[in-house]
């Protein structure tokens, strides 16, 4: 039963990916669907990083002693100002390490 489930899910996953990635198929998405799908990546990333930044030990931590919050704020500012992935990572990491040792 488990093997059948795995094979079925692999088939479904492959089929859904193939339909969108194969250029010769006549499947085209309309502009409304494309616009809706453009919001999926930011929504998923937000759902991943917000709990990491704000939750510590199963509690909300938005105080000044939270190094994750300082690193995140610095990374957001660096991304806005520099438009460079490398500078964003470097500045966010530096603020995270520095605030972790200060507090």
Image: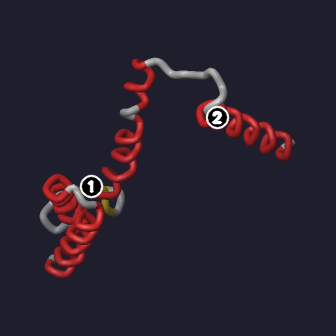
Left or right: residue 18 compared with residue 35: right
31 w.r.t. 65: above or below: above
Towards the viewer: 28 or 4: 28
- Give the camera-side residue of 60 and 96: 96
Query: Which residue is painted at 85% across and 40% down in the image?
Result: 4
User: Alpha carbon of mark 2 to alpha carbon of mark 1: how far?
Assistant: 40 Å
Q: Where is mark 1, residue-wise? A: 54
Q: Residues within 10 Å of mark 1 (few under 14, many from 20)?
A: some
Color theme of the render? secondary structure
Q: What percent of the width, then of the height, locates residue 70? A: 18, 64
Q: Is mark 1 on a helix, strand or loop?
A: helix
Left or right: where does residue 43 sit relative to residue 19? Answer: left
Placement of the N terminus among the 4 image quadrants: top right
Q: Mark 2 vs mark 1: give the one in front.
A: 2
List the residue tagged with mark 2: 22
Q: Where is residue 100 in the image (x, y as percent from the top left)?
A: 22, 76
Residue 27, quarter of picture: top right
Disc marking residue 15: none
State the residue at coordinates (43%, 26%): 34
Q: Earlier in the sequence, mark 2 or mark 1?
A: 2
Question: Residue sitting at 15 percent across and 76 percent down?
Answer: 103
Above or below, 62 against 102 in this view is above
Q: Where is residue 21 in the image (x, y as percent from the top left)?
A: 60, 36
State whether residue 92 is above or below residue 58.
below
Q: Which of 93 and 101 is in front in this view?
A: 93
Which of the 4 quarters of the picture holds residue 63? bottom left
* Label 2 element class: loop
């Amino acid at each position: 039963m488990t093997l059948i489930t795995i094979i079925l899910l692999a088939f479904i996953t492959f089929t859904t990916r193939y339909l969108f990635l194969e250029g010769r198929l006549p499947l085209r998405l309309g502009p409304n669907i494309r616009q809706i799908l453009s919001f999926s990546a930011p929504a998923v990333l937000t759902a991943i990083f917000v709990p990491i930044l704000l939750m510590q030990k199963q509690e909300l931590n938005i105080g000044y002693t939270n190094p994750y919050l300082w690193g995140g704020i610095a990374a957001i500012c660096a991304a806005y100002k520099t438009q460079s992935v490398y500078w964003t990572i470097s500045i966010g990491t530096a603020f995270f390490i520095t605030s972790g040792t200060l507090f």
